[in-house]
Amino acid sequence: MKKTGILAIFLVVFSSGYAQMKSLSKLEPGVSYELAQLRKSTLSEIKYELNLKIPENKSERITGTEVIFFNYKKQNDTPLQIDFKEEPSSLISVSVNGQIINPVLENEHVIIHGKYLKSGANKINFSFVAGNGALNRRDGYLYALFVPDRARTMFPCFDQPDLKANYSLTLTIPEKWSGIANGKLKETSSQQGLKTLKFAESDLLPTYLFSFAAGDFKNFTEKISEQDSRMLYRETDSVKIKNSMDSIFSLYRNSLDYYEKWTGIKHPFQKHGMVVIPDFQFGGMEHPGAILFQNSTLFLDQNATQNQLNNRSNLIAHEVAHLWFGDMVTMDWFNDVWMKEVFANFMADKSTGASADKSVYDLKFLTTHFPAAYGVDRTLGANPIRQVLDNLKNAGMMYGPIIYNKAPIMMRQLELLIGEENFKKGVSEYLKKYTYGNASWPDLITILDNHTPEDLQSWNKVWVNDPGRPVIDYTIKYKNNTIDRFTLSQHPEYGKEQKVWPQEFQLSLFYADKVEKVNVKLTGKQQEVSGLKGKIKPLFILQNSSGVGYGVFGLDNGMLSHFSLIKDPVSRASAYISLYENMLNGSGVTPLDLFHFFAGQLPKEDTELNLRLMTSYISTIYWEFLPEDIRLKESENIENKVWQALQTQKAKNNKKILFDSYQGIFQSQKAYDNLYTIWKSQTAPQDVSLNDEDFTSLALSLSLRNSGNNELMQQQLTRIKNPDRISRFKIIMQAASSDQKIRDDFFNGLIQKQNRTNESAVGVALGYLHHPLRQNTSIHYLPKTLDLLQEIQRTGDIFFPDNWLRSTFSSYQNPKALEAVNQFLMKSPDYNPILKNKILQATDNLRRAQKLVNN
């Protein structure tokens, strides 16, 4: 709704009086940008006092009382809109400045007529029944997750990021439960089997960062910055707990120390606190004083792989970085949500890489961010880093690999462009200027612009405001066996618009006995690299050998036959990524040839992150880009190669990666019998470490190849001891069942919101439901899957729509699956454009498969 429309409504209300408030039925649901601007100009000094009574039984509703204090710039009798996305019956009573009023709740807003308000200090009291949508109520515990605009689903509030407030919270919970919130716990009392927790007033926060958790948690306390800092958790594996606690708190403290020194700003909030959640739908969420973390990422056993250790250190560093980037300085509007995420990821990379060798940092950065960013940016549905947002009800759709993975790549190029010291000075100035306030990306760019002569505005357009990536290639002319001229060129992967991505990367010339490297600063559509003139003709040239450059880099035909000359792990990773991206574009190498090349590299590639990258590519090519008849021909050969590589590799982590790969692609009876024996006896191959979750995963892999798998899965169910993991497995086993009716009932059950509440488990279950070995009987679910997408977006958390689509479509190559997608899009020409892009992103490999599989 445009601003004039909102003003017209306000005028109607004002002129017709309170009796005519039914005209407000045209008010826009959610929080429009116009409404947010209006409230920002009239509201200040907001405080919330909340008192919630939480029953142990999750089916019983939570009741609450609330007081909102605020200063108000009164504009005639214009009504005030307070956000509350619940049924009118949930609003029990309302009083404004001591006067009881008839509550009016329409289109997700409590309407307070201007005649009850005054200029200056105001106070509104509510009695209400809390909404459950964002409270994530599980058996025995709950946690509040209000990002990006879901606080309004629980209690009446001004649910926009630039109206920061202080929160005073009181929780009444079962006596055996524990609780945590943003503020310090200042008082505890017990009476008649109930416990009341009163928390100190929080620091200044937007609604999406207000949070609390309560339940049957274990408590662990350790000092952080000389404060007693508490962790709530439910993990029951004593080995994992013992092996992880010191590491978790050490990583937290190290991150905290790094950011305090880098920013020059001490930790900006009153306390530290963590809650570790089973089946958490995110990796983590950065609520100050009550950071939520995913259990499976934090608690690891002594056999954790380097990838698992990296994920844990990155996750903790990411959430701690948010305390400055997002929590202390918050975006004005959720079109800049990427700002907090890019800084959290970029700074996490810096802090975790600070004590590591540069090549270790470079490899981790490359393998973490580039494949994920390319997975969206190569698609027809690619979105820019900074997107347009009209209403906060659509804010959840802003999230995805572009803001988490392309944005850090962009930020690294920006740092290279203006220099590390200038970048640091600009960011520190930005943080200090907007401390405890709100700011936008243009605010930061304006500050950085003052620290560099570079034209950041034009740079910003192609990197931040436009989607897509460049295709970068070269032409080379030789004279007397030396390079006479080497010219780079770039053009957009899609479209006819002439654009240039200014960036730095490296070229490497490989010879039998040496490697020569040249750094390139590419600034135009075509550019001669004078530093190569006169160099002896190499065996091959590798573009982007340092892995810093972004785009599709053309390949040298001589690379594969001399690949053993690439000794540097970062250069090998960059080559693997370029090979895969060129294969997808139908240039340089076919899927089958690349599949054979990667299979041949398995015993040779001894760098763990590269081996993980390569086995991921092998699995994708095998299931998505090889025709079924070719796949069956290749099956036993690839099984043997993976198993032989498992024996050849020395490092235990590499052996584990290869075992997981073997488990993921096997199809032969011989392999089934091998893996079944391992599962049945619970005896892993030599030097391969398998924990309870690994055996659960193995049982599910076996189940997909077993036409009567009920007994196998029931036996696995009895092996699981942790109650939260039992609940998770019960969801997934329905989707993996060999009984078609059970699978049908599972899918049809997802129509009901209550069956989707454990989004993490549902996403995994959908992957088994639509596994390539089950697709002949699952393809008929696709139209309904697409029909449900808007409901998924409306009721689910921020990552669920993407998870819903990718878990469903990611392994299909059947043309009928693409036909279902195309028909859905054709019959919905006015479909939400952001959701349409997510469909195009999730089905990109399906589209490419039609060309690649048939060639």
Image: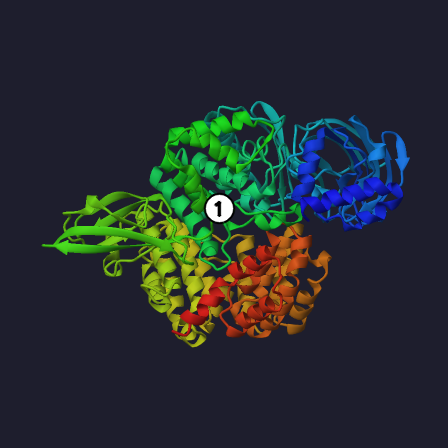
Above or below: residue 270 compared with residue 10: above
Residue 324's spot in the image, x, y percent?
55, 31
Q: Is residue 674 left or right of residue 509?
A: right
Q: Which residue is mark 1?
A: 465
Q: Quarter of the image holding residue 230? A: top right
Q: Quarter of the image holding residue 13? A: top right
Above or below: residue 28 compared with residue 252: below
Q: Nearer the viewer, residue 702 or 476?
A: 476
Q: Nearer the viewer, residue 479 or 63?
A: 479
Q: Is residue 553 left or right of residue 771?
A: left
Q: Nearer the viewer, residue 854 or 109?
A: 109
Mark 1 Cα shell of 10 Å, populated few (<14), some (14-19), many (≥20): some
Q: Secondary structure at mark 1?
A: helix
Name the residue located 55 percent from the left edge and 72 percent from the top edge: 819
Q: Is residue 449 left or right of residue 158?
A: left
Residue 326's spot in the image, x, y percent?
57, 35
What is the image's colouring? rainbow
Residue 73's spot in the image, x, y percent?
74, 29
Name the residue located 48 percent from the left edge and 37 percent from the top edge: 348
Residue 222's spot in the image, x, y percent?
59, 29
Question: Given the current orientation, which residue lies at the most extreme left position?
Answer: 480
Name the residue located 61 percent from the left edge and 73 percent from the top edge: 780
Above or below: residue 189 compared with residue 92: above
Question: Given the current orientation, which residue lies at the most extreme bottom position?
Answer: 629
Which quarter of the rendered picture does the C terminus lie within? Answer: bottom left
For the question of whether residue 432 can be seen, the reply is yes
Q: Amino acid at mark 1?
A: Asn
Q: Is residue 796 left or right of residue 531?
A: right
Total marks placed: 1
For the question of whether residue 293 can be seen, the reply is no
